[in-house]
Amino acid sequence: MINKGKKMNRRHFSFGLLAGVSLTACAPAGSINSKPSLPTIPLGKALVVFYRPSAFAGGAIRFTVNHSEGVVGQLTSGSVLYKIIDAGTHTFWAQAISQDTITLTLAAGQTSYVRGDVKMGLYAGRPTFSQVSEAQALRELA
């Protein structure tokens, strides 16, 4: 009987540990519950901050932000992504069922904020980008 109880306790402990790790792994990187700490912009570079406010509507839909240099990251409900990039004109895009693009002209040392949203379509949500002011972005990220 004592041996059986020890096995049961290990099983409960293992289940609890697995559940805790699983929940932690689901948390989005760069959560927007607090003001993000932005990286230092190297000389001759610019910073693009992509964020998506947390929302119930369309919250399960995620999309990948792309650039000609490769994938920036996956934008999920309540997440923030950063991209340090050369100054100049750059196009970013995301595609779920439909595609949206945004083209930014960035100066060296500049930080640009892009809000990602999901617009509900007939069959599925579609990604949309809009460039916003620093004041609006920081207010929405607070």
Image: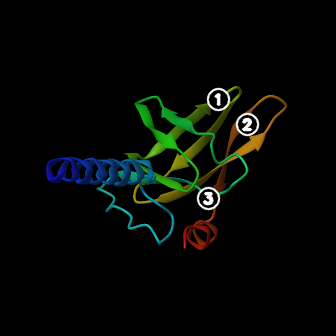
| Left or right: 24 as drawn, with respect to 141 | left
Looking at the image, do the residues carrying marks 1 and 2 touch, with CB atoms under 8 Å apart? Answer: yes
How far is the residue under mark 1 from the one under mark 2? 8 Å
User: Pointer 3: residues within 10 angstroms few (<14), some, or many (20+)?
Assistant: many
Q: Residue 30's spot in the image, x, y percent?
A: 43, 57
What is the count of numbered marks? 3
Q: Residue 10's spot in the image, x, y percent?
A: 22, 50
Residue 53: which numbered mark, if any?
A: 3
Q: Quick one: label 2 or label 3, which is nearer the N terminus?
A: 3
How far is the residue under mark 2 from the one under mark 3? 15 Å
Query: Dot 3 lies on which element?
Result: loop
Q: Looking at the picture, which amino acid does disc 3 mark?
A: Pro
Q: Which residue is pictured at 70% across the width and 26% down the height? A: 97
Residue 104 sits in quarter: top right
Q: Quadrant of the C terminus?
A: bottom right
Query: Dot 1 lies on which element?
Result: loop
Q: Residue 7's spot in the image, x, y percent?
A: 20, 47
| Left or right: 73 as drawn, with respect to 5 | right
Residue 87: which numbered mark, if any?
A: none
Q: Looking at the picture, which amino acid does disc 2 mark?
A: Gly
Colouring scheme, one of rainbow, by chain, secondary structure, one colour:
rainbow
> Which residue bears the numbered disc 2?
125
User: Pointer 1: residues within 10 angstroms few (<14), some, or many (20+)?
Assistant: some
Q: Looking at the picture, which amino acid does disc 1 mark?
A: Ala
> Which residue bears the numbered disc 1?
96
Q: Quick one: label 1 or label 2, which is nearer the N terminus?
A: 1
Is 66 located above or below residue 141 in the figure?
above
| Left or right: 24 as drawn, with respect to 60 | left
Is 49 located above or below residue 95 in the figure?
below
How far is the residue under mark 1 from the one under mark 3? 18 Å
